[in-house]
Structures are given as structure tokens and as C-alpha cells.
Amino acid sequence: MHTSTAAVATAEAAPVSKRLPLLDVLRGVAILGTLGTNIWIFASPAGEAGPLLGSSGATTDDSFIGGLFQLLTNGKFLSMLTVLFGVGLAIQFRSSEKRGRRWPGRYHWRALFLFAEGTIHFVLVFAWDVLMGYAVTAIAVAWMLRRSQRAQNAVMWTALSLHLALMGLITAAMLAGPGLEQQSDPQIEALYASGSWIDQVQFRLDNALAFRIEPVVTFPLLVFLFMLGVKLFRAGAFGGDAAGGRIRMRLLVWGLGIGVPLNLAVMAGPDGLFFLERYVAAPVVMLGYIGLVGVIVEHARRGIAMRAFESLGRTALSGYILQNLLASAVCYGWGLGLAVRFGSNPWFVLGLWAAISAVLLVGSSLWLRRFTTGPAEMLQKAVLR
């Protein structure tokens, strides 16, 4: 549902020598940002079923720390990953054009393999996987890149209009209805507190349609953000020249200037505004985040921290999978089972997020000292080769 994760499979889109450093940093930031949302799912009593039982699907608690995480992360990094996946698609298309290859050609195999990876990840690790939805969207958008710019723009803005209309209808229905109250299910809570890994796998399979609802409902948004990523890449928004810097500054000013007040306004409203917060306000804030990270990368010294985020961005698919494995092992009953003991403490959630983030940043840096890409990326390349 969240995460996720992400443009995660597109870090291989260009050879290392031709990579755009900002894209790697953004991917690293996005991976840790998705963890900032997902960590509350792992720590909740109902685990992955929590968003289905919650009053509006919110995944944080009512503490100050929970509200801060919700403001900073909810929906923002899911949108960022989607945009970055569109950027990766644009890089693949440009590479195919330069080599005179037919498009989409072999890209469909890449997308199908990503769908298979997402399916395995969904069944074995995390019910709210994003890779499956990204793979389907990639196949659809890949065909659009062969069309005229006018046709692409028409599809892009039509998708946004459909998305806004759908979010408006859902929000109106939630506000007009009796509203949803927080629910609890002792059986589900016992499943995540003391159930086996196999029991959780079976639970995901039994409720696959419910767990797969987000990419279905937000498919128009995915299409729009994919194509927005293509448009930003072609405009030079991620380049190191002055034109790219100007674009990023505009994203920073407009994205945060409009998005943050809008996000705060819907957060202060009733729970029925949740869909507007996560799927309308959050993408606007995300554009500001891209601009902000761009300004930092442009003006900050390339030290240990920035290199660590670059490393995580280059191993983004592996990082996405690993963060969910680590959180599951720490929180669920088949592992350490700490969620049932400490999950209600927001400081535990904050500490767990920080600890896993540190493991990802340090681990990816150490891994790339010996290898050129992450283990999951290696597997993908080997199979597709």
C-alpha cells in the first residue's frame, strides 16, 4: 500500500558512469521515506491488516511523533517513487532510441519480471507491496512514449482528472456516510503477535483482493505520476546545469508553498478527508521534496551522508525488500515479536525506523565497495540477460 518502494527497480537504468547523482539520492530518500510510513503498519497490533481496520486507513497513532510522521511521510514518498519510476522509464526509452532498438521491445520483459518480483514480495513478505502496481503501469505508459507529445499530454491530464474526480467521489461518500470507527479483531492481532510465518502467508493469499485495492483505485494517479516523471526528466529537472536548478527551485517553492498548507488543512479535518490527504495533497508536497533535495544536493558538500544516500539509491530494490524483511522479523511473532510489547510506544517506532534506516545506509555503502549493484538488482539483470 505504501511504499513502498519503488522506482526501486529502475536504479539500473543507466550505467554507473552516466548516472545522475540527484536521482540516486532521491531514490535513497524515497526508500527511507516509505519506511517512515510502513513502520507504523509493522508496529500496529493488527499488522498489515491495520489499514483495513482503521477509521480511514491512517497508519500512525495520535501522538506528536505519529502526527509528525504522518505529515512528513504519508503518501509523499509513494508519489516520489512513482515519479522516479517514470524517470527510469524515460531513461530506458532514450537509451533504446539511441541504440536504434524497437520500443518497447524487451522492456516488457523487464516489467513482467518486476511484476513477478512484486508478487513474490507480496505473498512472502509484505501485503502492501507496490511493485506489482508499478509493473502494470509501466507496461501501459511504455506504449504511450511512442505516441505524439500531444497524445501523451492528453493521457496525462485525463488521468489526473479521473483521479481527482474519483478521490472527490470517495471523499464525499465517506463524509456523507455514518463514518468508520477504529475496529479490532483479536484473531488478526493474535496472528501477528504469535502466528507463524506460514499463517501470515495464508492470510495474505486469503485477502489478496483487499490488499491489492490501492493500486487499482489509484491507477489513474500512477499513470499521471509516471508521465510526470517522464516530462520532468525530458525538461532537465534532474540535471546539474542552471536550467535544472531553476526547475527544482520552482518545484520547491510551489510544492511546499501550496502542498504543506493544504496537507495541514486536510489533516485538521475529519477522517473522511484521508484520501484527499494521501492522494491529492501529498503528491503536491512531494514535488516540493524533490526540489528541496535537489537544492541540498546542489549546494551541500558531497560527504559521507550524501554518498550513503546515493548507495542506497543504487541498491533501491534490495533496500526496499530488506527494510520490510527486517521490520517483519523485529515486529511479528515469528521473529522477535517486539510489536506486541512496545508497538504502542511511539519512541519505539521512531527508534526502529532510525535503526533500520542506519542498517540500509551503512549496508548499501559497504556492499557497493565490492559489487556494482544490489543483490536483487543482480538477480534481475542475470535473469533478463
Image (cartoon, rainbow, N blue to C red):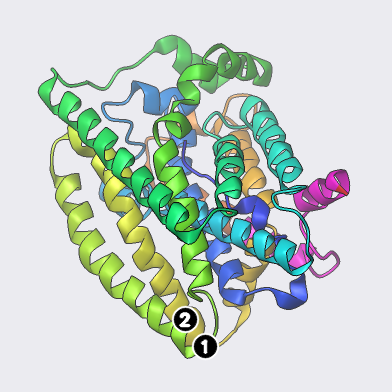
Residue 379 position, x and y percent, is 83, 46
Rendered image quadrant of residue 115: top right
* Amino acid type indicated by mark 2: Gly
Residue 350 seen in the figure:
no
Residue depicted at 48% across the width and 60% down the height: 149
Note whether 8 is above or below 295 in the view shown. Answer: above
Instruction: Tell me, for residue 241, which label it has, or none.
Output: 1
Looking at the rendered structure, the secondary structure element under dot 2 is: helix
Rendered image quadrant of residue 286: bottom left
Foreground of the two, 164 or 82:
164
Judge the density around disc 2: few (<14), some (14-19), many (≥20) Cα neighbours within 10 Å.
some
Number of numbered discs visible in the structure rendering: 2
Foreground of the two, 193 or 306:
306
The majority secondary structure of the magenta stretch comes to helix
Left or right of residue 218, residue 236 in this image:
right
Q: Which residues are magenta?
A: 358-384
Residue 288 position, x and y percent, is 34, 67
| Disc 1 + disc 2, Cβ < 8 Å | yes
Residue at image mark 2: 244
Residue depicted at 62% across the width and 78% down the height: 304
Residue 241 position, x and y percent, is 52, 88
